[in-house]
Amino acid sequence: MKLKRPVVSLLAIGAVASLGLTGCAGGTSAGGGSSADAKDIKLTFIQGVAGDPFYVTMQCGVDAEAKKLGVTVNTQGPAKFDPTLQKPIVDSVVATKPGAILIAPTDTAAMQAPLKAATSAGVKVVLVDTTVKDPSFATSQISSDNVGGGEAAFKAIKSLAPSGGKVLVISTDPGVSTADQRVEGFETAAKADSDFSYLGVQYSHNDPATAAKLTTAALAKDSDIVGVFAANTFAAQGVATGIRQAGKEDSVKVVGFDAGADAVTQLKNGTVQALIAQQPALIGKDAVQQAVAAIKGEKVTAKIPTGFFAITKDNLEGEGANYVYKTTC
Ligand code: T6T
């Protein structure tokens, strides 16, 4: 089934997030392009981390669109979500002079200079998912509304724990733009609600074992925590483990970002109550379109926001099934 754009729904848990997105924010002419033949256009997609179901699904969108447009795309990704591993990949890809790089930068500061250098070397840069401190060099930026997603996660916890109480966030690392924005959205919403007490954010370094330890330690300190927001796939995996280890499945509500196979299992098991699923394949598809338009000197769109969908046990077999991430294309 084809996904609509944008998709924003928390209906099954009674909370509605409204983004008012148009999917088109100010078209600009790419400039400096040529009327290149599709068969001569070469793109490289650089993931945030290889093997992450979010980027695997994005690659499916990238590959399908590249095939449709008749361009060549090559995918690479670091073994960890780590700028010290991603930067050398960028440098070596730029040396091969592709027409464009589609990239999820792993850090807002550390990836700024390497990506700016790529554009100075004549390689167009399309930012997917994450961004950098000053993305003005980028051809286009395509990502979910992550602040909205964080707000939606809070609304989901509120609807699951309506009497309120203590809530905690487990994120990845500061400097990951998407996760920082999710935390911001959650924090703003939690602090504005006097029924809830916001315990802050802790960082798991994208490592599920660390996220599990942080969760059990937080529950040992505050046994009355009512909700945890896990800001991405690996945080959610660890939080679910921590909740199980602490025997708190019945009292702590967990909302995780992303919808890989593990997350779906946790949803079915009842350790996680809602998943904020992004649309990674759509992000990948849009990124290829923008890169190709830029290379051809056609109009590009500076920012393209994509939507999200809250998957719960109630909609998992229905509409929610369309938003589960892929393990292969
Ligand atoms: O949540 C996604 C992505 O949006 C984020 O930037 C990094 O983590 C994920 O890849 C999930 O692991």
Image: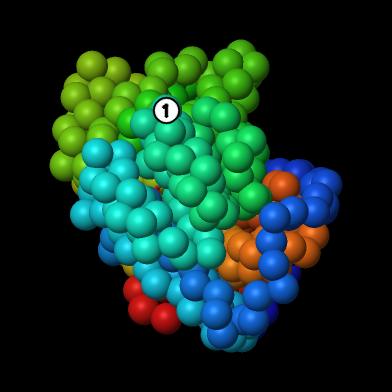
What amino acid is found at the position of numbered circle 1 in the picture? Ala
The one nearer the camera, 127 or 217, is 127
**Which quadrant of the figure contains the C terminus?**
bottom left
Residue labelled with disc 1? 109
Residue at (36%, 78%) from the top-left corner? 328
**Visible residue check, residue 126:** yes
Task: Using residue 305 as the reference point, say whether residue 313 is left or right of it.
Answer: left
User: Which residue: 16% across, 42% down?
Assistant: 209
Q: Nearer the viewer, residue 232 or 316?
A: 232
Residue 120 in the image, given as x and y percentages of width and height: 52, 43
Pick whichever, 114 or 307, lies toward us. 114
Left or right of residue 28, residue 32 in this image? left
User: Element under label 1?
Assistant: loop
Vertical position of residue 269 compared to residue 143: above or below: below
Left or right: 281 with respect to 31?
left
Residue 156 appearing in the image: no
Quadrant of image for the N terminus: bottom right
Q: Residues within 10 Å of mark 1 (few under 14, many from 20)?
A: some
Residue at the image position 75 percent from the left and 44 percent from the top = 19
Q: Is residue 191 above or below residue 156?
A: above
